Amino acid sequence: MSTRHGVFVTLEGGEGVGKSTAAQRLAALLREAGREVVATREPGGTPGAEAIRALLLNSDTELTAMAQTLLHFAARADHVARVIRPALARGAVVICDRYADSTMAYQAYGMGVEIAAVEALIGLTGLTPDITFILEVPESVSKSRLKSRGETGDRYERMDAEVMARITQGFRAIAAAEPARCVVLDGTEPVEVVVGRMREVIRERTGR
Ligand SMILES: Nc1ncnc2c1ncn2[C@@H]1O[C@H](COP(=O)(O)OP(=O)(O)OP(=O)(O)O)[C@@H](O)[C@H]1O
Ligand SMILES: [Mg+2]
């Protein structure tokens, strides 16, 4: 592991729970306080990883759940090496919109890849977030938010309710297993409240 001076924060949860909105607001809040913030996302965050993202989110390309898993980790390897580790080494706060917990929740809990396989890949990646915020909203809220965004839906946004329920369960299981890292937040609260709580937790847990 390289020397880390920064703080690695990840935002996780199902579709339309407010991850990207919160990530943007949290980044702005920390920048106002004078911190260097690197706001990034997965899959993606580097040219190579963004190319893999296009493949992963294109619902016209058939891929087995294991193939998807390996592509997510391929993209992650590039992203971690080129963007996240260097930023942490500089002392930046890295805010990443989805990370390895999404692969565990979607591909393992949701789509049936073995949990142990994803755990092994997480071990190979070798970079665990300092703090992970898991946002939760009821399925009806998630649906209506996605609808109001007016998108036809990528591979993941087209998944059925049963799979989505397993994904939500997956995120809960991760949060329960790793309470020192994970904080579950109610995504139906106003965004200012959600982000204010994130700011508090970062201060409490890292002193920054
Ligand atoms: N706390 C909130 N209260 C009400 N609406 C919100 C809140 N957070 C986000 N939204 C709205 O919900 C929609 C989805 O939000 P956002 O894109 O941030 O979710 P996401 O988790 O990033 O979704 P995806 O999984 O598709 O990337 C947007 O229209 C956004 O404005
Ligand atoms: Mg988003």
Image (cartoon, rainbow, N blue to C red):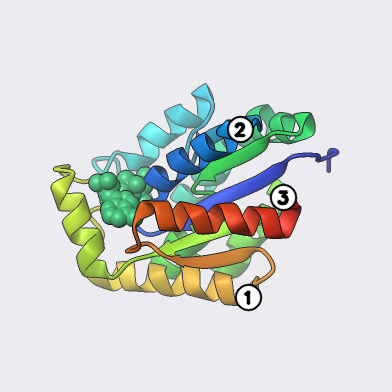
**Is the C-beta separation of discs 1 and 2 under 8 Å?**
no
Q: Residue furthest top?
A: 47
Give the left or right position of residue 172, taking residue 168 as reference.
Answer: right
* Observer able to see residue 160: no
Q: Residue at x 53, y 39 (%)?
A: 29
Q: Secondary structure at mark 1?
A: helix
Instruction: Name the spot of residue 178 as percent of width and height, x first.
Output: 65, 71
Quadrant of ligand 2 in image: top left
Instruction: Name the spot of residue 8 as percent of width and height, x first.
Output: 66, 46
Image height of 205 relative to 71, above or below: below
Instruction: Name the spot of residue 168 as percent of width and height, x first.
Output: 40, 70
- Say which quadrant the N terminus sits in: top right
Q: Which residue is mark 2?
A: 37
Instruction: Name the spot of residue 24 as percent of width and height, x first.
Output: 44, 38
Image height of 200 relative to 76, above or below: below
| Residue type at numbered disc 1 | Ala
| Residue type at numbered disc 3 | Leu
**Is the C-beta separation of discs 3 and 2 under 8 Å?**
no
Q: Residue at x 29, y 38 (%)?
A: 58
Judge depth for marks 1 and 3 and give the one in front.
1
Q: Which residue is mark 1?
A: 177
Judge depth for marks 3 and 2 and give the one in front.
2
For the residues marked 1 and 3, what is the alpha-carbon distance in whole angstroms? Answer: 20 Å
For the residues marked 3 and 2, what is the alpha-carbon distance in whole angstroms? Answer: 26 Å
Q: How many marks?
A: 3
Q: Secondary structure at mark 2?
A: strand
| Residue type at numbered disc 2 | Val
Q: Which residue is mark 3?
A: 124
